[in-house]
């Protein structure tokens, strides 16, 4: 199961939410044994305060995934705020495995060695993509707001880069210096009591007139809806997309991976895959507007 020019690869992105260690271990054991993905990201991306809880898990998780034949990518923080957090990024950048850069300050520690970039980096044009390639980027997952046509333009200008499209999951929109979960519970960020753990898929936020709006995850803002972009492999290849990223949620991620595997292998049509996904316990409505250069909340039916 390796990516080719005609068959895109599948990547399982990092867990964005604050899951307890036992849940993480159980999740990655099943991914290792059952999920048809080639590449798996591990590590804390959203909040450095969570790292002491989950860092002890990663050696066992990595060993299990690699024993199962998965390529492990070490994901790094998107908004390092302390000296300790910057040092942790520098330490990860010294690893021989692929590292996912989510903040530009990580480049000096990784420059010249292969790395991938996550959707938190502002890669909106060909010049930025080429700059990152010159520093060692091998795979770029552009920001989720970019359309498929925009990615196609970058891929045409930078043929040596593997472009990865964020295909499934609540869309990561922003990282803040403030903790929304702490504020919601009347707490300060420094004494947040890790209330974000109560919402393992993020907390849905509605407008004052009860319309679905966004979701919060500690210091992170995500879409309320779930990206569920499905396209035939030839359409992906024609637009320079060589990988699809699936972002973990509490729904059956093995079933999600199996559905997308059937899609990229040409065994299922996009409509059939959407039907499979719709039967899972997703945290929000399925959308794919951004990919079509439309508002992100639009569904497959409304963008056609």
Image: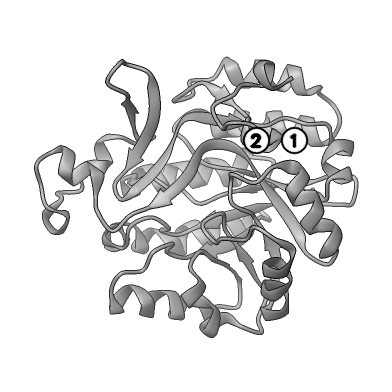
Q: Is residue 26 left or right of residue 181?
A: right
Q: Position of residue 225 (x, y in %)?
A: 49, 28
CA gap, disc 1 and disc 2: 6 Å
Helix, strand or loop status at disc 1: helix
Numbered tag placed on residue 22 in the rendering:
none
Marks 1/2 in contact by CB < 8 Å: the verdict is yes
Identify which residue, 85 or 120, lies in the foreground.
Answer: 120
Question: Total label count?
Answer: 2
**Apparent side of residue 200 relative to residue 124 in the rendered image (left or right):** left
| Circle 1 residues within 10 Å: few <14, some 14–19, many ≥20 | many
Rendered position, 304 above or below 122 = above
Residue at image point 74% right, 42% down: 148
Which residue has dot 2 on it?
Answer: 257
Query: Which residue lies under the disc numbered 1?
Result: 261
Residue 91's x, y, as percent?
44, 80
Say few, some or many: other residues with alpha carbon within 10 Å of mark 2 (under 14 / 14 to 19 / 20 or more).
many
- Whether 260 is drawn above or below 33: the answer is above
Question: Which residue does the image show at 66% across and 17% down from the upper left?
Answer: 302
């Amino acid at each position: 199961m390796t990516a080719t020019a005609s068959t895109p690869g599948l990547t399982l992105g990092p867990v964005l939410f604050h899951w307890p260690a036992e849940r993480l271990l159980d999740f990655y054991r099943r991914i290792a044994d059952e999920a048809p993905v080639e590449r798996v990201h591990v590590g804390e991306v959203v909040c450095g305060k969570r790292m002491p809880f989950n860092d002890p898990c990663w050696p066992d998780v990595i060993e299990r995934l690699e024993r199962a034949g998965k390529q492990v990518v070490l994901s790094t923080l998107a908004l390092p705020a302390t000296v300790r957090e910057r040092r942790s990024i520098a330490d990860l950048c010294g690893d021989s495995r692929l590292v996912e850069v989510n903040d530009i300050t990580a480049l000096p520690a990784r420059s010249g060695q292969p790395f991938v970039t996550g959707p938190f980096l502002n890669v909106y044009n060909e010049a930025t993509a080429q700059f990152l390639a010159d520093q060692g980027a091998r795979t770029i997952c552009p920001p989720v707001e970019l359309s498929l046509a925009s990615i196609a333009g970058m891929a045409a200008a930078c043929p040596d880069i593997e472009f990865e499209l964020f295909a499934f999951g609540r869309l990561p929109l922003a990282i803040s210096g403030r903790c929304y979960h702490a504020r919601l519970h009347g707490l300060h960020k420094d004494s947040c009591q890790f209330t974000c753990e109560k919402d393992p898929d993020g907390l849905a936020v509605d407008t004052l007139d009860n319309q679905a709006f966004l979701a919060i995850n500690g210091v992170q803002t995500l879409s309320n809806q779930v990206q569920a972009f499905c396209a035939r492999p030839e359409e992906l290849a024609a637009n320079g997309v060589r990988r699809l990223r699936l972002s973990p949620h509490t729904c059956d991620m093995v079933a999600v991976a199996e559905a997308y595997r059937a899609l990229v292998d040409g065994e299922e049509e996009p409509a059939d895959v959407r039907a499979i996904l719709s039967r899972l316990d997703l945290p929000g409505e399925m959308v794919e507007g951004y990919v079509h250069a439309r508002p992100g909340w639009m569904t497959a039916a409304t963008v056609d």
